[in-house]
Image: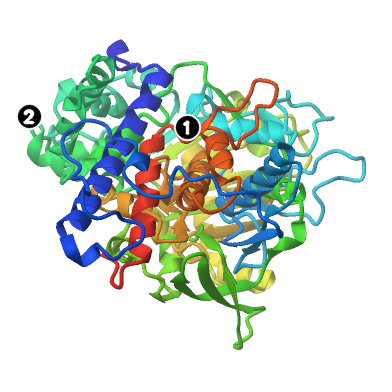
Amino acid sequence: MDETLNLNINEWKDIRNQWALKHAEESVKNDWNYLVGKGPSISPLPSLPSPGIPFLSGDHRLPDPADKLPGDRAKPPEPENDVVLNIGVIGAGAAGLFTGLLLDFLNKKYQEKFKTHKVQFKYDILEASERVGGRLFTYNFDDSQIKKDGSVNRNYYDVGAMRFPDNPVMERLFRLFNYLEMRKANDTPNSKLGDLLPYYIKGDKEPWHFNGTTKWGDYASISAQGLDPWKLNEDGKIPEDILKKSPGDVFNGIIKTFREKLMQDKATSDKSSEGWKYLMKYDDYSARSYLALAHHPALNYETIQWMEAFNGGTEWYDQALSEAVLESLDFDWQPGTDWRCILGGSGVLAAKMVQKLKNPSSVQTSTAVTQIKNKGEKQVEIAYAQDNNSGGQSHTYNAVFSSLPLGCLQRIDTSEAKLNYGIRQAMRALSYGPSGKVGIKFKNPWWLYKLNDANLKHAGLGHSDLSIRTCVYPSYNLQTPKEEEAVLLCSYTWQQDALRLSSLVSKSKDLKNKWREETELKNVLIHDLARLHADGKPGRTVDELEDLIRDSYLEHFAFDWYQNPHSVGAFAFFGPQQFRCSWPKIIQPSGDLAIIGEAASPHHAWVVGALESAVHQVYSWLNQHKGKIHGFSYLAELLEENPPTDDPNPFQGLPPYMRTETCKWQSVLAKAYREMPDYM
């Protein structure tokens, strides 16, 4: 790899956060100036002084709004009577559960500071599905997570989040692990449920099956055997100077200018935004259209397809170029990054979060929200139905934080929620990536012991253009004995690949009936697994491997995130213009209603994005009301501070993509728009 492309993780962290912050601040300026431009029509609003409201202009950072708006510096007295603030949280995934833990933390800190419980948060976490965790979802093939001998049962796979790199971007998540007493540990028979085991994202020898041919090794060693080892370029349409490099290196070389200009922004003393402006010039392009039209020299169809097939799912390059530039860095961290997985699966994280709540019974599953009404200051009404009953109930909360994926929020009646049109548009149009996984439980871990000199002892991935696309060799069952049952994540697909394979996935909730309806899927999985590993050597022909795999098969479980009504997609997958135009609207609170979750963070598809979105929105809400509610100023300032070294809690410290001034302006806008008859 070109060493000039090897960014330090702290530099990469600053680049993505800088990108997000620029968009957030531009949106605040535009929305504020829209209000100012309305002139006399907004003068009756209590949140806005008149006259003398300033326009916001220029590239400089936002000023603190406190000296321009009334009430923000007020210090309310301690109330004579108890003030109980009821908070509604929609969704019991990572963001929703973390919001509950954050409110518990604020209750504790208020009591420690003021020696009283006069102001206290109470909350309900309403979850439509029958389980908690959202995309923290682990499928267990057996009934118990613990074996009779007390060891952890490893017959599971993560249907959702499954791997976590320990680096500065994920710092808050690892602080949460520590808070929940989930520790790093080496993999031994005595490892405990929830231990953070080493995760091997690459093996030393992996199968690569393309164009009907399987090669073993890493990409560099395979390419060294010849210019075109898979015979992909027999018509010569992929230029030789490109073909001799890896597809990942080719793409990184193409976006090198973007990365360098963004780095120059960071390095300049005046915090230049030239790199950001340069990337903005191309935000209207998808990665594909940029490669084909704007890049010089333009790449032809065959070259782009070759790059995409090896770098991601089919149609992966339909995402925004700006997102592809930033996403390319997600896995491009410096060598030696310590990756971890959770023993027992990521569902253990969700379970431990629930157990840590001061009141775990506040989590109500099988409770589907049907309507949200924004009725006035600290009055947000939620209607909901429980256990699939047609009748419903309602409750009014002082604030509501919705962690629902936007496709799910779209199905809820929000006609009286006072959402801005940008949010409504995002609910309809924001792209969510299709993704599916299939795990198989086998009689034995044949990939560890029965592939002769190709035994996969170091985990990693299997790469292919087959229907299964990517095979993931679990890092948590490398010590499984030769004749014990073991689980293989035999297919991990995205985009069109996921949609196609998932057409064979049954929607039946009855497991035996589901298996019957998935006979064709089972046959495709077994045949593709055989083809992926078959290179024609003794014991590794397609027929031999298919017999081996079919004989070892016990059962499988397939899941498609787009079929799932509680997610309607796997993760936010921003198309051209969408991050610039939609994301700032998503993160703007609507009075006392705010959206949280991975889509409300620049770190899409990562658990840490869900956590940071909750801190951001709770902090913004505290700022809305700190002039009226005792202790809110203290609690907001507490969240601004980084956690003390003797208490590295996961709650303190604003997300690095948010400045305090930006959050405060969002709070100001939330108050103003709550009082307007028609929200923009």
In-front residue for pair 50/122: 50
- Name the residue tied to disc 2: 297
Q: Does 233 sit left or right of 570 as displayed? A: left
Q: Position of residue 561 (x, y in %)?
A: 49, 59
The residue at the far top in this view is: 3
Q: Is residue 566 above or below residue 136?
A: below
Task: Estimate how packed mark 2 is, as few (under 14), some (14 to 19) or many (20 or more) residues with alpha carbons within 10 Å.
Answer: few
Please say if the residues under marks 1 and 2 sit with CB atoms less than 8 Å apart. no
Question: Label 1, on which residue?
Answer: 207
Q: Could you tell me which secondary element the residue under label 1 belongs to?
A: strand
Dot 2: element: loop
Taking the view exactly as shown, the residue that stands out farthest to the right is: 149
Q: Amino acid at mark 2?
A: Pro
In the image, residue 293 sits, relative to residue 93, either above or below, namely above
- Tell me the amino acid under the disc marked 1: Pro
Residue in the image at 80% along x and 31% along y: 191
* Residue under the image location 39 percent in, 44 percent down: 664
| Relative image position of residue 162 (x, y in whole percent) | 58, 41
Q: With 650 as the anchor, is 25 left or right in this view?
A: left
**Residue 90, picture quadrant:** bottom right
